[in-house]
Amino acid sequence: MAKLLELRNVTKIFKGGTVALDDVSFSIESDSPGIVAIAGESGSGKTTLGMMALGFLEPTQGEVLYKGKNVHNLSNKERVAFRKEVQAVFQDPFAVYNPFYKVDHILEVPIQKFKLATSKAVAKAMIEEALVTVGLRPQEILGRYPHQLSGGQRQRLVVARAMLLKPQLLIADEPVSMVDASLRATILESLYTLNREFGIPILYITHDLTTAYHISDHIIILYRGSIMEAGEVDPVIKNPQHPYTQLLIDSIPWPDLQRRWGEKEIIIPDGAKAAEPNRGCKFADRCLHVMPICRESPPPLFQPNQAQIAACYLYDSAPTLAKEEVGTLFSSKNLAYSSPG
Amino acid sequence: MSDYVLQVKDLDVHYFTDAGIIEAANKVSFNLRPGERLGLVGESGSGKSTTALGILRMIKSPGRIAGGEVLLDGIDLTKISEEEMRLVRGSQVSMVPQGAMNSLNPVLRINDQIMDAMIDHGLNISKAEMRERAAKALQAVELDPRIGEMYPHELSGGMKQRACIAISIVMSPKVIIADEPTSALDVITQRQVMQTIGNLQERMGSAVILIGHDMGLMAQFVDRLAVMYAGRLVEIGTVKHMFTDPLHPYTRLLIESLPRLDAKGEFHGIPGITPSLLELPPGCVFNTRCPQAMELCSQRIPRILNKGSERQVACHLYENGV
């Protein structure tokens, strides 16, 4: 198994002492191209993780490896390859465009920079093909300015741009959170198609567990910079093990009248207690099942079943999984969980 | 007296821009019972926030209310003086704004901001009584009254949002309009804030209009749902009817596009794009994206049809039906 992207004990501490990511390890394998979701609320470190995977931020400790090489120590040639092979889709479909250029620009630049086409005609054919893949009609898109397109079209255009480069990894940070509900499904479908038809692994970063459930194969739940739970997406969403994940899933307002919203009690942490240094589990102050040990040392990753792990002492009778081994859960070839019904 | 606390009748809000007249809300009509929870959903630009601002007469130039009535207990708010309207806002119809972080004054303590609302609405009581009432308002939104002595930057996002709710309920309004009150919050805080609004509303007997685009939140919170598209209200009905038997093709597609637990990996996006409000298609505003469009749809604007006592739909498919 070749590791395409690996985060090895990555910690990121920002100026002022904010710990955005706290000793996180996982990997994405190139021979099992699935969609891995990184889910968490604001402040969980999910975007920091994405920025580090893209090499835009350097970890304070640990390393980010692409095909076994540290992304901050690449030779010039390797860096160009990395930039071509790892593509990104960001949250804001407005900010990525220069309003003075026609939208064709963001498709033409990568073709020139990476010398993808031998002639103008070839370049045009490539652009049209990429647009069609994401469900856009080239004649409706090309030659227009960004303000003439809707948010959904602009976001799909960014996906098309990523497509053009035939990437080996796509990192999508909240790609649908600024897009209207009626268009979300279409963009998610483009991403899903990229993965299923072209075998491109995707790191899908989101706060929205309903879309994460919908398109991903595996999921990592982050809370204040640490992995709380990870595994196959079906059991994590349908049968969450960690009390944090349980509270999170219970708080999602599903568009389903049969489902009751929010049956679990929410504990608002006492301000005084939160000020005490806590060497243990970060969720302890809000946890319904808190035990003395939870405040003493951080829980290791217990593996209560084949398909999922939870950093929680409730499962201390289960075997543990070393942090560095989290990636082994994401091999989509052997899904251990079979959905009931 | 009618059974309704609020009646919106054929409300038109138009923006008079250099590029032309934008009909941001076009003949919007709905009724609200005391204590009822109504959801108003639509994409950005559909006119849901415009409708709310129209009710409160807070439309800014170049926009204005171009027609229709807003009856609060039978009194037409579009006809009263600006001074009278100012007293209605906050005390009878209040608004929980979107994005709590920006709507609080950063240099005033929370208590002063709550008391401002009372003073501004002509409440003639002593400072001590006001303080007591502010403390009660904070308790009502499940905040410690001590928070009243703090400044906004000392509070978390969820606390700030609840402080905003405290300000908007301190005068016990009959109608609370909540415009995407939780869009900037994570799901756990969202649930807390929505439960706070729900509990309060039940205790005070106020009606709530919840504006947003999160159909999940609507399914879990409201009694009735109104769907807007390109400035028009296309369907309204009980949340159960709207989710199980949507009539308007747009409502149906919107419901089908939602991610469901039992249909993983299936995507049903709505094809096409929302028309520009400056270049609305003739006839039904949805006809360019509608899979069931007929010739008539691009010729005539559909009337609003009553389909049962709680149900209205604006679609030619139902013109000759039951």
Image: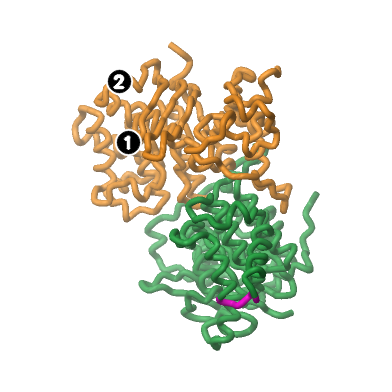
Chain colours: A green, B orange
Mark 1 to mark 2 CA distance (whole Å) = 19 Å
Q: Is residue A339 above or below residue A88?
A: above
Quadrant, the N terminus of chain B? top left
Hey, which quadrant is residue A26 in on the image?
A: bottom right
Q: Position of residue A185 (x, y in %)?
A: 64, 50
Q: Which residue is mark 2?
A: B80
Quadrant, the C terminus of chain B? top right
Q: Which residue is mark 1?
A: B61
Considering every residue shown, the one lying at the far left of the view is B126
Q: How many marks?
A: 2
Which SS class for mark 1?
loop
Question: What residue is shown at x 64% (from left), y 20% (from top)?
Answer: B307
The answer to whether residue A163 of the structure is visible from this angle is no
Tell me which segment is drawn in magenta: A113-118
Name the amino acid, label 1. Answer: Ser
Q: Is residue B112 highlighted in magenta? A: no
Which SS class for mark 2?
loop
